[in-house]
Each structure stands twice: as C-alpha cells, then as structure tokens.
Amino acid sequence: MEHHGLIMADTPPIDPTIPPSGTGCVECMATDDGWWFHLRRCVHCGHIGCCDQSRSQHGSKHAAAEQHPIIRSFEPGEDWFYDYGQDEYAEGRELAPPDHHPLDQTVPGPQDRVPRDWELQLH
C-alpha cells in the first residue's frame, strides 16, 4: 500500500474480493439495543461498523483494534475511502459488492432500535 509515495509495510493489504460482513454494524446487531447513524466498511476484512457520529463508533474501534486503518463508506451514493492512520481521505479501488447497505434500510438504523432522541445521541 502506498501513502504519499511510501510503501507502508505494516499496513494490511486491501483484498477487493472480500464481501462486506453484512448489511449493518456487526457489534450493534449483536446487542438488543444497538443502532447506528451511518455505516463504514473495512477494506481489509469487510467488517461493517458504525461511523464516528454513531454513539458506539464501532468502525473506528475496529480499525484501531485490528490495525485495519482504511475504510470505505457503506452508504448509498457514497464511494469515498478514509485512512484512520493518516487521518485523511484515501484512494481506493472497487470492492466486492454490495457497495452499500440495502436501499430500504433506514438511516439511522435499524428502524426498530433507533431511539426517539437519536439526534441528541450523535457525536
């Protein structure tokens, strides 16, 4: 992987054939009351986590814990990449489909778990 012309030996490779882990945040879905604002996809392993505006921030926690610094938005109409290690937007390549959560999935989601005061709980 290149960063500003340097090859970073400690950065895991991006495997474009790995599909996303699901349609929602893995950790939020594992609880009875988990919910998210927006979703992020790890380009190293396909993990879907919630964004840093979400109350649990599972996407960036996964990146730090697993040393998988690069994510891609998992929102419809968004195709940007971000590198947590460099704290900046990044270049990326096409990944295995799907590129976003289902179009009928609510934002925030999942619909049956989003609290009435969700806007007050964003970071």
Image (cartoon, rainbow, N blue to C red):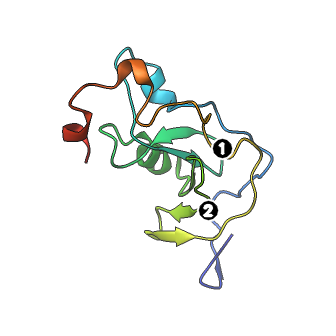
The one nearer the camera, 89 or 12, is 89
Residue at 44% from the left image edge and 37% from the top image edge: 107
> What is the x, y in percent for residue 109?
43, 30
Position of 117 with respect to 54 (left or right) is left
Q: Residue furthest right?
A: 17
Residue 36, above or below 73: above
The mark that comes first in sequence, 2 or 1, is 2
Position of 40 with respect to 12 (left or right) is left
Residue 112, above or below 57: above
Q: Secondary structure at mark 1?
A: loop
The number of numbered badges drawn on the structure is 2
Position of 57 with respect to 123 (left or right) is right
> What is the x, y in percent for residue 54?
34, 41
Residue at 57% from the left image edge and 30% from the top image edge: 104
> What is the x, y in percent for residue 84?
46, 61
Q: Residue furthest top?
A: 32
Mark 2 to mark 1: distance in Å?
13 Å
Residue 38, above or below 73: above
The one nearer the camera, 58 or 77, is 77
Mark 1 = which residue?
45
Mark 2 = which residue?
11
Residue 113, above or below 100: above
Residue at 37% from the left image edge and 24% from the top image edge: 34
Q: Amino acid at mark 1?
A: Cys
Q: Amino acid at mark 2?
A: Thr
The mark closer to the camera, 2 or 1, is 1
Q: Point out the image quarter for the N terminus.
A: bottom right
